[in-house]
Amino acid sequence: MLRFLTAGESHGKGLVVIVEGLPAGLPVTAEQIQAELARRRLGYGRGPRMRFESDELTLLGGIRHGRTLGAPVAIEIANTEWPKWEQEMSPAPGRPEKPLHQPRPGHADLPGMQKYGFTDARDVLERASARETAARVAAGAVAKAFLGPLGVSIVSHVVQLGPIVSKLTRRPMPEELDEVDSSQVRCFDAEAEHAMIAEIKAAAKAGDSLGGVVEVIGYGVPVGLGSHVHWDRRLDGLVAQALMSIQAVKGVEIGDALDVAGRRGSGAHDAIMWDAASADYRRESNRGGGIEGGMSNGEPVVARVAMKPLATLNRPVLKTVDVLTKEGSVSFKERTDVTAVPAMGVVAETMMALTLAGEALRKFGGDSMTEVLRNHSSYVVSLKEQR
C-alpha cells in the first residue's frame, strides 16, 4: 500500500514528507523532484513569496545511487526564510512576540483555535497553509516516476479563472504539457489566457483575489484500478477525496457529472464499442471520466477541481473579531497571491498521481519495479486473451 505523511509549518524550519510503499529499483533523482517543485511556483498572479520561499531539497533516506531501496523515502524541503522566523516559530519553550488574536474569515484559523483551545491563530494557520503542498508535490514527483513505466501520464490545465471560462473542448495531451506550462496561467486556450490575465490584473488593482477550475487528466490508466466491492475502494471516491484535500478546494467533478445530471439517461452514458484495429473495447465518449462502477475503464481519468478565491486579501475588508477582547476588527494580511489556481493544477496532478500509483500498486503489487512491471505486463496480456 502506498501512503505518504507530511510534517512542518509554513514558516517553520522546513517541510518533510515520507512516502512508504514504493518498490525497490525505481529511478528517482533530486532533479526530477526539483522540476516538479518549480512547476508548483508557476502562474501569473502569484505573490512575492514565490521569490522568497525557494525550495531547498534534500533526499534524506530510502534512495541510494538514484534508485529506491524499498524502504520509506524521506524528503526535506528547507525554508530559506527560517532565520527571519526562528524567534516566532521556535520549537523551544517560550512565548511568541506577536500573537495573532484576529482569526481570518475563510481560513482554518477560528475553527482550529476553537478545536484545540488556542488563542494565537498562528498555532493553526502555519500548518493549514498551502505551503504544505510543496511536500505533497515532492511525493507526487516520486509517484509520477512510478507511473511512467506503466504508461500513465498526468496532465492538468486551467479551464476557468474567475469568471473567464475556456471554450476550448480539446484536452492537452501528455506531450503538450510543456505548452500548458508555458502559458502564464497554465491555460491551453490562448484566447482565454489573455482574458484571464486581464482579470487577474483587475483583481490585483482592487486588492482582491480570484478562484477558478482546473481539469486534471490521467492518460494511459489501465482497466481495473479501484473496485466496486467496498465503498472505500471506489476509484472515483478516492480521486475525489484526494483532490478535495487540497487547500482552498471546495468542489470536485468526475467526468461530466454536472452536465449529465441534467440529461436523460439515453444521452448521459458512454456507449461501448469494439475497435477491431486495436482489438480493444472503446467508449464513444468519456462523460464518466474514465471510471465506471468505481473502477477505471481504460479511458482517460478526468476530474475538475474548483478552488475558491483566496481568503487573504491585499485589501483589509473582511470583518472578524478579536478572540480576547471580542471587539470587531478586520482580517490581518499575510503575504498572499491574487490567485493560485495555476499552481493548484500542479498539486492536483500530484494528488491524482499518488492516488493512481497507490491503486496500481494494490493491483500489480511487488517488492521491486521488476516484479511490478512483470505483473503489469502479465495483466495486460491476460486482458488481450479475454478478448
Image (cartoon, helix red, strand yellow):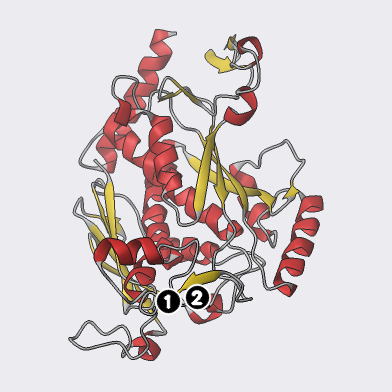
Label ID, residue 262: none
- What's the residue type where badge 2 is placed? Gly
Image position, residue 307 (x, y; %): 56, 52
Q: Quadrant of residue 315?
A: bottom right
* 8 or 371: nearer the viewer: 8
Tag 2's secondary structure? Answer: strand
Q: Which residue is drawn at 70% across and 71% down?
A: 204
Residue 64 can be seen in this image: no
The residue that label 1 is drawn on is 322
The residue that label 2 is drawn on is 328
**Does 266 appear above or below 155?**
above
Sequence-first disc among 2 and 1:
1
Q: Residue at x 36, y 60 (%)?
A: 111
The C terminus - image quarter: top left
**Does 285 appear above or below 70?**
above
Image position, residue 372 (x, y; %): 29, 36
* 103 or 52: nearer the viewer: 103
Image position, residue 369 (x, y; %): 29, 42
The CA span between labels 2 and 1 is: 6 Å
Image position, residue 384 (x, y; %): 43, 14
Mark 2 and mark 1 in contact? Answer it, CB < 8 Å.
yes
Tag 1's secondary structure? Answer: loop
Residue 374 can be seen in this image: yes
